[in-house]
């Protein structure tokens, strides 16, 4: 019994396993990182459409089925029937919030290859939202700005992530 403890404590196979796991973990962590949200409405991002909230995507060559942004807060301005919010309405709403991206969900709405969806929403409905920051304090400030317009009576705060679905 004491001989086994001495063997484990001296390194042996356990130490080799720990070293192997430690060397492997950095690769796993980089594969599972989350992209930084780019909430400036002036920034255009490749692989994203104008109505999408874009984020930094991996450039490591690792195949994925989906890739997630970092979590963020949004103010849901409007919920509607799937695929019913026109781009013209999004652009008009964007003019109300020039410092933060106004985005809408168009996942699986047409044949143009929409590969962006969002977490913490019901996929059976469409929505119009404005990015509200990384903290609840920022989100509450944005919600107050939204309510001050008097145009979005049901506006509410939601934590979300953008999901890039690879075809």
Image (spheres, helix red, strand yellow):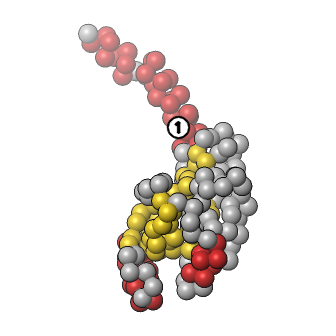
Q: Quadrant of residue 145?
A: bottom left
Against 63, residue 34 (above or below) is below
Q: Say whether residue 54 is left or right of residue 139.
A: right
Given residues 108 and 96, the one toward you in this image is 108
Residue in the picture at 43% in, 21% down: 14
Residue in the picture at 56% in, 74% down: 102
Q: Quadrant of the C terminus?
A: top right
Q: Say whether residue 66 is left or right of residue 43.
A: left
Mark 1, residue position: 25
Given residues 60 and 128, the one toward you in this image is 128
Against 39, residue 67 (above or below) is above
Q: Residue 148 at what x, y percent from top left?
A: 41, 89
Q: Quadrant of the N terminus?
A: top left
Residue in the picture at 41% in, 63% down: 159
Q: Residue 144 at what x, y percent from top left?
A: 39, 84
Q: Residue 154 at what x, y percent from top left?
A: 37, 76
């Amino acid at each position: 019994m004491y001989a086994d403890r001495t063997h484990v404590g001296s390194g042996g196979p356990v130490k080799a396993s720990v070293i192997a796991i430690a060397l492997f973990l950095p690769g796993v962590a980089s594969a599972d990182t989350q992209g930084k949200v780019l909430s400036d409405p002036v920034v255009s991002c490749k692989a994203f459409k104008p109505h999408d909230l874009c984020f930094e995507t991996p450039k490591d060559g690792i195949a994925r089925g989906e890739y997630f942004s970092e979590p963020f807060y949004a103010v849901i301005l409007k919920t509607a029937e799937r695929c019913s919010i026109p781009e013209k309405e999004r652009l008009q709403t964007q003019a109300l919030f020039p410092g933060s991206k106004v985005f809408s969900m168009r996942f699986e709405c047409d044949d143009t290859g929409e590969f962006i969806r969002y977490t913490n929403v019901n996929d059976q409905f469409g929505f119009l939202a404005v990015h509200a920051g990384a903290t609840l304090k920022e989100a509450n400030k944005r919600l107050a700005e939204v309510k001050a317009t008097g145009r979005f009576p049901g506006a509410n705060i939601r934590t979300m992530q953008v999901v890039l679905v690879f075809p």
